[in-house]
Each structure stands twice: as structure tokens, then as C-alpha cells.
Image (tube, rainbow, N blue to C red):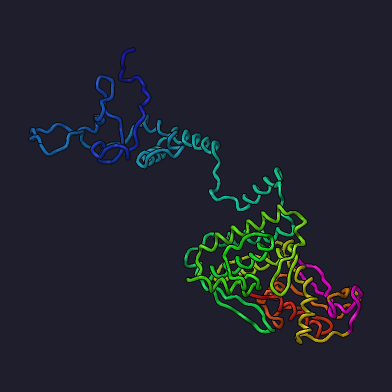
Amino acid sequence: MPDDENTPRIPAQRAAGDDLPDDARGGSGTLVPGPREGGRAAPGAGPPAARRPEPAVAEPARTDAAPGPGPVTGAPSHTVLKSLLGAWALAACSTEETDAVEAHLTECAPCADEALRLRDAVGLLQAERSLDLDPLLRARVLENCLGRRPARIPVPAWAAPYDAEAARLDALLNDFGDAEWHAPVRLKWFEDDRRAGRRTTVAGVIGHLMTVDAMVATALGLDEPVPLDPEATAAGPTARTEALWRAARYPLTRTVREPWREQSHTLIRTVSFAGGGAAELDVPYGEFALPLQDAMLDRAFECWIHAGDIADAVDYPYDPPSGTHLHGMIDLAARILPATLAGRRRAGLASPPRGLVTAGSPGRSLRLEIEGVGGGDWYIALDSPAALASPAHAVAHVALDGVEFCKLAAGHVSPQEAAAGQVGDREAISDVLFAAASLSRL
């Protein structure tokens, strides 16, 4: 077929302006096809209008000039710009090409219409959406996975609060740097009806949780994460923690996180494989003992409380547990209150009983109403832990918010500061509030 000057041709694929060497670009930075030689474009040459006229006097050849074409000037042709509309719609043009195409669209109505059609077509290929992940995506994925394939060895319901609170605390610690791990933390509790406290660091708090969790671990036949002397091992939570802090030559660092988290995973795996028969296994706490299912609730409660202490130290918000888990923690404290009140009475810290009754018989009671998430009603026996508390024998009524009651039981709020609604026997109310505060410890 003869090569006619007027025969339309599809331009060859062109490199972006940034891909060419500096001496192959025009002065304006615009890329244009070169002139034709015998009907074909000569590589490296500019259009006829862009070539410089021959000088009237021959210039001497420069020996220091680099070989190559001269500067290229002028705008791309209509054909070239039209061929770039598809790439422009896909945002695949270079900066120079984009400027040239958009300038041309203001002057050429057919190309402007074609550009709009192409841009609409690109929008149909891929709708624009936010790059931010849905915050509920993880929860939905986990729920879907567990629904389709439940765990073969499920976590017991009484161990689920500890599993959740340990995971939440670990997530809080995940982004901590060295400075946060050494941030000062003030631990607070009530002792002999007086405020007590101890200063430590974030790493020190995790060490405290680890050594008290080890009391549950050893009851299950597991090893101590940090060997302690036999006297401290047989003591309660406070003595064990003090022994750990003394044994460290230097203040604890972020390295304490891994053994604490590994121990919590081991506890959950062990109780899950043990099944329901392990729920009543006694866990010694020094001066008293708790069934394993209550000990796991106690560990969940302390994990949440100390996670809040850590969050306060680094100025970070921290939410309370879920309603179901919070209800279990409140129920544990309410069940312990009668025995705690009896112990305080023997120590002379509470008023004497008004009337002793035989075990299992109804006696004076206090109605403890917990409001909000995880709340409910509990009746506390006042005169004897073996008495049967009942609404018919209630002599006082106390109403508290669930989180407020937990802070009272943790020693973070004093009985005088507790925002409680109170009706009835004032002495009985005071005894119960102080007994709740005395549940706290280091």
C-alpha cells in the first residue's frame, strides 16, 4: 500500500516525559512527534515548525557540545491529544500530558464530550471508597468464623471474663514505647479502714498481675513464671508482689509483658481442657481460699482495675468490661460481703450483730441495688454469713452504679465518697460500704 502523506496513522506508544533523558526533551517540556521523512517520522526530530532556520553564516562546530537534537517547542497536535484521552481518564498521564490534555479540552468540544464519557466509564469500573477499614470488620470476621466453626475446646463461661480482660490489657500495652513502660503508676487500696498506696511503674503493675496470676497457675499444677523463695510463695498477693519487686536487680521493663501474656494464655488453655470439674478446685490466697471459678473472676476484676490504673498513668481512655462480665464481678463481691463483714466484726471494725439466727434461717438483710450495665439486686446477710438474706427482712437499701461499686471494692473510692443512695439503718449501710472497700488489696 503506498505511503500517502494524508493516510491516518495510530501514534506509537510514547514514553512519559520523566523517562526521557534531559537532552531529548523540548524547552517547554512538551512531547510531540517528529517530522516525517518519506512519509515516516524520523526519530528524535521535531515538527517542521519547531526546527530552527539555517543560519545565514555557518557557525563553527562546538567540540564541547553533546550530540543530539535541539530543543523542541510547540503544542501536541489534536490527534496526539485525542489519543491520550483514555490515559487521562485513568489518571495515567504524566504531568505535562495532563496539562496539555486539559488545556485542549477547553477548546475542543468533541474531545471534551469524549473525555466525559471516558471518565464516567472509569467510574463504573471501580467506585471510589474510603481507604479506612471498617472498625467493626474484625468483630464481624471473628463472629462469622466462630459461628461457622466453633472452638473444639470452648473456654468455660466462668473463665471468659479473665480471657477478655487480659486480651484488652494486652491490646493497651501493644503500642507502648519504653517511656510508657516506665511511666509512674499509683496503686491504691484500703487497709484497716485507711487509704493505702504504692508507687510503681507500668512494668511493675504487669509484674504484680503476673505473680498473683501465678497463684492460680500453681493451683493447677503449672510452674511459677518467676521463681520466688518458699516463704513468699506460700504468702498472699501482697507478699508475693513485694518479693518479686525486691528480687529484680533493676526496675522491671517491657520484657515482663511476654511472660505475663504467655502465662495468661496457659491458664485459659489449662482450664479449658480441664472442663467443668476444675471449677471447684481451691486456689489459696494466703489467709483465705477461693474456688477456681471465683479466682478467675477475681483475676479478671484485678486485670481490669489495674488496666485502668495504667491507662490513667498514660492519659488514655479505658472502658469497663461488658455487661455480662461486669455482672459476674459484682456478684462475686456481693457473695463475699457477708463473710467479710463477719471478719470485720470479729476484729472490732464493725457494729455487733443485732440478733443471731441459726444457719439457713432468715435474718436481717441489706438490699444492694446496682444500677446500670451489669446491675441487679443482691441481699446481704448482716448478722451472720450463714443466715438467709431475704427481702422480707431487709432493714436498709443502698443503690450504686455498677462501675462505682467496683471502684469502691477496688479501694479507688472511699465509702464516704461513694455516690450511693441510702435508705434505712445507717449503721448497717456504713458496715456494708466499709466491708466493700476492705475487699481491696495491693
Q: Is residue 342 above or below residue 247?
A: below
**The quarter of the displayed image where residue 66 is located:** top left
Depth order, front residue of 414/110: 414
**The quarter of the displayed image where residue 257 is located:** bottom right
Q: Is residue 91 above or below residue 332?
A: above
Left or right of 81 on screen, residue 394: right
Left or right of 43 on screen, residue 188: right
Depth order, front residue of 376/388: 388
Q: Position of residue 413 (x, y in %)?
A: 67, 78
Q: How many marks?
A: 0
Depth order, front residue of 77/184: 184
**Residue at the spot x=63%, y=70% of the render?**
233
Question: Furthest residue to the front?
Answer: 230
Residue 14 visible in the current orientation: yes
**Residue at the spot x=52%, y=35% of the render?**
121
Residue 374 colored magenta?
yes
Left or right of 6 on screen, residue 67: left
Q: Position of residue 345 (x, y in %)?
A: 79, 84
Q: Is residue 418 above or below residue 173?
A: below
Residue 323 visible in the current orientation: no
**Residue at the spot x=66%, y=62% of the render?**
217
Question: Furthest residue to the top?
Answer: 1
Q: Position of residue 160 (x, y in %)?
A: 70, 58
Q: Is residue 354 above or below residue 208?
A: below
Left or right of 291 on screen, residue 80: left
Q: Position of residue 77 (x, y in %)?
A: 34, 32
- Dividing the image into 4 quarters, which one contains the C terminus? bottom right
**Residue at the spot x=58%, y=74% of the render?**
242
- Dividing the image into 4 quarters, which one contains the N terminus? top left
Residue 308 colored magenta?
no
User: What span is colored magenta in the figure?
Assistant: 355-384
